[in-house]
Image: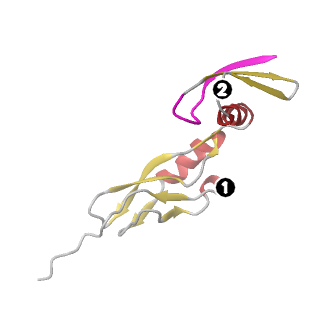
Amino acid sequence: MEVRELICIGCPLGCPLTVRLEGGEVEVSGNTCVRGADYAKKEVLSPTRIVTSSVHVAGGTIEMVSVKTEHDIPKGKIFECMGEIRKVTIPAPVKIGDVVIADCAGTGVPIVATKNVESVTEPVA
């Protein structure tokens, strides 16, 4: 039997959870709500994360824009996802929610902008 100790992030209470794995069965204790049990099962069987980063902006009022995965991705795909993000430069203007990468690292999850960036406008002579 494998036993893991976790802190639940399903709600603000942060319950200490004990997860017991035995023969494909998952037993969770310490949670005060259903979200705790759901979180613990997902975390031990198929952990996922939201990835946040930034990408370069060409012709923008700032050089970088913050981005994130639209949904959580498998934890094992984080480094592959970051490798793709590092290679991207997008043109200004950028709006919150713009898709920067449609399918990051083959996860089916898009990378989206989380900040607006305006274009640099050249003064007219």
| Residue type, numbered disc 2 | Asn
Relative placement, left or right, of 77 versus 2 is left
- Nearer the observer, 96 or 103: 96
* Chain part drawn in magenta: 1-13
Q: Dot 1, crowdedness within 10 Å: few (<14), some or many (≥20)?
A: few
Which quadrant of the figure has residue 50? top right
Residue furthest out toward the front: 32
Q: Nearer the viewer, residue 9 or 66?
A: 9
> Where residue 87 appears, x then y in whole percent?
48, 55
- Left or right: where does residue 53 sit relative to residue 73? left
Asked whether, in this view, residue 111 is left or right of residue 119, the answer is right
Quadrant containing the N terminus in the rendered view = top right
Spot occupied by residue 124 in the image (x, y as percentages of width and height): 15, 82
Q: Which residue in the rendered view is the most extreme toward the bottom?
A: 125
Label number found at residue 31: 2
Q: Amino acid at mark 1?
A: Gly
- Left or right side of 25 for 123: left
Q: Marks 1 and 2, how far apart in space?
A: 34 Å
Q: Residue at x 35, y 70 (%)?
A: 93
Q: Is residue 28 magenta?
A: no
State yes or no: discs 1 and 2 in contact (Cβ < 8 Å): no
Of the pair 113 and 83, the residue shown nearer to us: 113
Q: Is residue 24 above or below residue 63?
A: above
Q: Image point 53% across, 47% down: which residue? A: 82
Q: Nearer the viewer, mark 1 or mark 2?
A: 2
Residue drawn 42% across and 56% down?
A: 114
Helix or strand or loop: what does disc 1 sit on? helix
Residue under circle 1? Answer: 106
Q: Is 6 inside the magenta-drawn segment?
A: yes
Residue 111 percent across, percent down from the top left: 53, 57
Nearest to N terminus: mark 1 or mark 2: 2
